[in-house]
Amino acid sequence: MKQISMLLCSVILISLCSFNVNDKVPTKLYPSITTYLKAVEKDFDKIPEERKIQLKKIALYLQTKLGAEKKAGLVFICTHNSRRSHMAQLWAYAAAEYYGVTGVENYSGGLETTAFNERSVRALTKAGFQIAKKTEGTNPIYEVSYAKDAPVVKAFSKKYMDAPNPTSNFAAIMTCSHADKNCPIVQGASIKIAIPYEDPKDADGKPNETEVYNERCKQIATEVLYAFSLVKKTK
């Protein structure tokens, strides 16, 4: 039994190490987003090895689900579903389009409801997303577009179990340490993977506010893109 377990571990490690970046396929991404992703793609070697281990878990989950079911779901979770989780969700859609990975649905949610922070909206807009506010109020709904002819993504703050998020058969990707610690079990999740980011909220109202939000947006884009680059296309 011990030998079998060691063999299985070896197979998993080999499969992770043998992931290849997908050959580029023509995408419908907006040119500005394509340019942004080509730039961050060059920074894969700057991702710390301990974070790559977690990102490879996301890739392996997607590979397994897409191979078996032709579809997979990711729910990016932070405490307020205001900043980091929205950035990760939207970059996941762009990354999938960039590498031609089909069948992945991306969502975001929190442990409580607040609002999609306007500073995050500005950072994502600067990166190339087209974002339009469709409702007013304390928790406005935004429509986000990232590619020609792709369905718009409705972005607003919600708890991770609220509609339109799935209630089962998804990977919970924890984008903040607070949510990871305070939600040890994510209801309905098939797996929980932690990739916490520092909260750009700490820079709110400070002279470096824009710089911090743009940097966090870039970091999340780089790491999410890396995870998707490891997913082999499935027929």
Image (cartoon, rainbow, N blue to C red):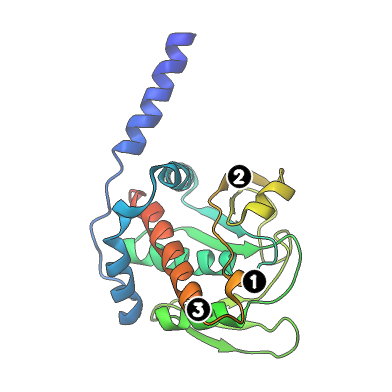
* Residue at mark 1 to residue at mark 2: CA–CA distance: 20 Å
Q: Say whether disc 1 or disc 2 marks the residue closer to the N-terminus.
A: 1
Residue sitting nearer the eye, 50 or 170? 50
The tag on residue 208 is: 3
- Asked where in the image residue 166 lies, by quadrant, the reply is bottom right
Whole-percent x and y of residue 135? 68, 89
User: Which residue type does callout 2 highlight?
Assistant: Lys
**Residue drawn at x 42%, y 83% as measured from the top left:** 126
What residue is shown with label 1?
82
From the image, state whether disc 2 or disc 3 is nearer to you.
3
Q: Provide the secondary structure element on which disc 3 rests.
A: loop
What residue is shown with label 2?
192
Does 23 appear above or below 141?
above
Q: Provide the secondary structure element on which disc 1 rests.
A: loop
Does 44 appear above or below 150?
above
Crowd class of label 2 (few under 14; some 14 to 19; many from 20; radius 10 Å) = some
Left or right: 6 in relation to 45 = right
Residue 152 is at least partly visible in this image = no
Does 116 appear above or below 93?
below
User: Which residue type does callout 3 highlight?
Assistant: Asn
